[in-house]
Image (cartoon, rainbow, N blue to C red):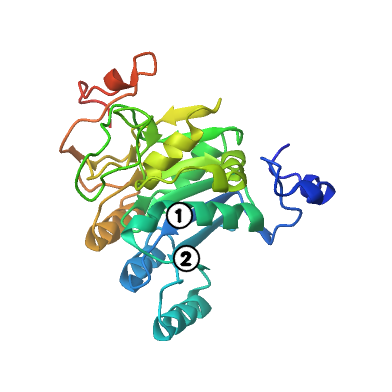
Amino acid sequence: MPCEDQTYGAMHKDQSDQGYWNLSPRKSFSCFLFISVLSSPRNTHERDVIRETWGKDLPKDIVLRFVVGIGNLNREEKDSLSREHMLHKDLLLLNFNESFNALTLKVKETFQWVDNNVDFKFLLKVDEDSFVRTDALMRELKLKTDIRLYWGFFDGRALAKQKGKWEEKDWILCDRYLPYALGGGYVLSCDLVHYVSSNSKLLKAFKNEDVSLGAWLGPLDINRVHDPRFDTEYKSRGCKNSYLVTHKISSMLMREYNNNLQKLGHLCSREFQVRKSYIYNWSNPPSKCCERVDSSVP
């Protein structure tokens, strides 16, 4: 069933715990693109920078929410977030305990809330230190199908972490992660968000939220689109005017990019590349998918 169908869930209430594609009969509001920004409770400054730059004056068909877990916050912290939400109307306060190890749970909870409350076509998940070209992204999305789309910058050759803060003790599937779109920014069509939401109790949660999503969607017949214009690795590859999402940038650089767009009409005052990108080769095995050999790739 298509994810905008609101009758199926109402007709099958008695099977709500069994249906893998259980659909909510009502939605609170609708939009074309829902932007989920994973945010820490105390990072008011980071949220304000986004509100003043790329998140300012968004068109009506885009809804942006900063997702914050409030389960382990004290009364003063909750009151502060409530005041912030009353002022800006853009917080999504969910009842789970915030922690570094709860990122995957945060994504699950976000997908469930959006699936249950929003009639949408696409979801963009980004971090607080990501800059989004919403205008260019929307132009691209208007041309894409809203069926089984998983769009971002993919990696398929990453070895499972054996130590450090990203150690995955429960990863026993193989010695490498399944191909996944990096978490600095990726887009999902509404049906894939619905799939994760409906099956959330069955899905194994790993420490990396983006690795987890790649594993959850691994066996599905979906459209994985690798796009170098998503500069979403663990550090930015530089600045290219073609970038749709840029990850790991400072508040100062976020303001600079926004000023460039306003005054120059493009993202970069000077285009540059600090390391090569790649085109994902889907015909090769994942271990050989991603060779950085072409400097012309953004």
Note whether residue 244 is visible. no
Q: Nearer the viewer, residue 194 or 139?
A: 194
Residue at 23% across / 51% down in the picture?
A: 165
Q: Secondary structure at mark 1?
A: helix
Residue at 34% across / 52% down in the picture?
A: 131
Q: Which mark is residue 105?
A: 1
Q: Secondary structure at mark 2?
A: loop
Q: Work out how far the residue at label 1 is from the one at label 2, CA to CA, in angstroms.
A: 8 Å
Q: Nearer the viewer, residue 72 or 26?
A: 72
Q: Quadrant of the C terminus?
A: top left
Asked if 14 appears above or below 1 in the picture, the reply is below
Q: Which mark is residue 197?
A: none
Q: Amino acid at mark 1?
A: Leu
Q: Nearer the viewer, residue 167 or 245?
A: 167
Q: Residue furthest left?
A: 274
Asked if 44 appears above or below 180 in the picture, the reply is below
Note whether residue 83 is visible. yes
Q: Position of residue 250 (x, y in %)?
A: 23, 59
Q: Which residue is mark 2?
A: 96
- Kindly indicate the quadrant of the structure image that contains residue 236: top left
Q: Position of residue 193 (x, y in %)?
A: 57, 44
Q: Answer left or right for 167 relative to 149.
A: left
Neighbour tally class for label 1: few under 14, some 14-19, many 20 plus, Cα within 10 Å? many
Residue at 54% across / 28% down in the picture?
A: 220
Q: Position of residue 172 (x, y in %)?
A: 35, 33
Name which of mark 1 and mark 2 comes first in the sequence.
Answer: 2
Q: Residue furthest top?
A: 283
Q: Amino acid at mark 2?
A: Phe
Asked if 18 appears above or below 77 in the picture, the reply is above
